[in-house]
Image (cartoon, rainbow, N blue to C red):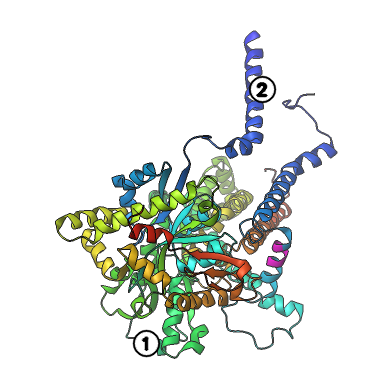
Amino acid sequence: MSLLNISARPSRLTCWILSWVLFATGISLYFYTAQRRHKENPDDRVVPTLGQLAAGIYQASMHPDGDEEQQPDNAAQSAIQRFRNGMLWKDTVASSRRFLYGLALLFPAVLLGLHMGIFPYFGVFFLRFILFFDKIIALSVLPILFIAFGIDELSKVMLIVIGVTPTIILDTFNLSKSVPPEQLVKGFTLGASDFDVAYRVVLKQIWPRVLNSIRLNLKPLMLFLFAGEMIASTDGLAYRIALLRRHMGMNIIIPYVLWVALLLFLVDLTMRLLNKKLHPWFREA
Amino acid sequence: MQRTRLTAHLYRSIAIIHIALLLLAPVILQRPLHAGEKPSFIVGWSVYVGWNPYYYMAKTGIMKKWADKYGIAIKVQRFDYAPSLEAFVAKNIDACAMTNMEALDMPAAAGIDTTAIIVGDYSNGNDAVLVRNGLTFKNLPGKRLLLVEKTVSQYLFERGMAMNGMESQIKRVHLVNTSDSDISAAFMTDRSQEAVVTWKPLVSQISKQPGVTNIFNSSQIPGEILDLTVVRTDVLNRKDGAGQNFAKALAGAWYETMALMSGTGPGTDKVLAAIAEGSQDSLQSYKEQLNTTHMFYTPKAGMQLVTSPEIKQKMALVKQFCFTHGLLGENTKSPDDVAVRYADGTVQGKPDRVRLRFDPMYMQLADGSKL
């Protein structure tokens, strides 16, 4: 048996065990450190214990933000109402809204990329500029963004748009270029119009790859969203993390980070399944 | 054939070494690098008018001179403010420059017993509430206010509201948590923003804009926002006595620099210009910041503040603020759970939970030239 054998076929059980080893190591290292640090200093906040984490999760999901105006009858509300008034839910709603706006604005970008790839006049008009624009680090020209979009909601969404759309445009452009020209000719000989070819021949077959590309760009999208919320905001997941960092509220920060990871994973999974369902003919990782 | 086998072997050993390194990394990284050398300490500072002297001490060798005198090594390291606090709480550094408020809500509240050995200055106008359109505290409810939340900025704002009889309306002001690296650009470029709380040198830049007025600043609450040098108490109490020497060397280097700063004549300007370099400031701008900073140039002045009865009232205000905003931790039931011990030995809070100590000993030694 060799660990370094390309044609090895590990058994099901081995696969299952091996894939969880790093998780188990990480978790046990964490709790070992937590326990050691708490023995030394019972008030330690840097590495909270399980109990503190549980208290943090309860606090985050059931209690409203302490600085907000109090709801009149907090104690009388049902668990669901309290959860909906809790900071975790409110922050999630605020961040999700920005995330969805950002995501929605990627779709015009796909169309632009497609048109640039298909229609030569479009291509020459936009390509050079977008290649340039793609290389601009949006975060380094914040004051300009503030002048153009203020510092409220719009600027956060625009930061996402500026950060992520050029990649999507260029990717769609390349994908549409890579469709074999014979297919376009074939389309025309079968009597298709220019738009038929663009939407029903090219877009149709690059669409699953485009969705994939959007999916792979979810993380940059999230990074820009977080950056925006950390610059100036009144709510949102990254806002809360930035605030809690100020007094080492790691017992809430860690659950928040895991929650964000879970949400991202779910969005990613949904998009993957959707892609599979919509395009069963498409076989590619 | 021989060759390919050799390469296969090579690759395999590389892979094995990689895996081994990956597994061993935590062990290797944790090992102390120098054992048995002279004790070494790190002091962290961040850019602020009252802390820039650390830059000067490190650059001119004053710090090294004092460290050598006490047979220790001291490394002076510049941080951004928040990371310096985090490094101190994580025990990566031994001493740090911070305000009294952060000393309470970061190390003290996280159970790190902390001792303030030098009181360098208090903010005497460095922090300010600035507004557009001639707003006053009376108009602020319902408006947006840019600031770094849960810091001295918010403390200043709430004190301002309270002193203007608007205490009950504090929660009606919409706070926008804004990163300090972007706050001046955000306020100056977005003219729909009407109010901001920040500190110098940002205050100076923003005030220069037409139509911006300063409606409240820290000179109206003198001695409440103190700038300290703190050391972890367990470092001070090291068995080999090196921690004491570290604190003495810090105090020695600090007051030598203070004497240079407060002198008169052209030599002083040279010193101040060199200190200003620590924050890429010009001499003129640094002097302007010094005008709104009440420096304690002599150890005697610092001692007077630490031993005065007022410090207790002022710390009580700050502690109450930290408690109200959950900065002392969620499971803290009362502000007394994080207790402060003062120079005269009195304890504010529960005696078994002393987390922050004001120790005038090192300033006293400096005052008597006994360092």
Drawn side of residue B141 relative to residue A178, left or right: left
Point out residue B285 in the picture as x, y percentages from the top left corner: 24, 63
Q: Residue at x 23, y 58 (%)?
A: B282
A171 vs B10: above or below: below
The answer to whether residue B280 of the structure is visible from this angle is no
> Hey, which residue is sitting farthest top in the picture?
B2
Camera-side residue of A66 and A155: A66
| Kind of residue at disc 2 | Arg
Q: Relative to residue B125, is residue A40 depicted above or below?
A: above
Classify 10 Å Cα crowding around label 1: few (below 14), some (14-19), many (20 and above): some
Spatial distance from mark 1 to mark 2, Cα to Cα? Answer: 73 Å
In the image, is residue A4 above or below residue B34? above
| 1 and 2 marks on the same chain | yes
What is the number of the mark on residue B136?
A: 1
Single out the mark in the foreground, 1 or 2. 1
Q: Is residue B255 magenta?
A: no
* B154, A91: nearer the viewer: B154
User: Which residues, given as a range, are shown in magenta?
Assistant: A52-56
Residue A119: x %, y % from top left = 46, 51
Q: Quadrant of the N terminus of chain B?
A: top right
Residue situated furthest left in the rendering: B266
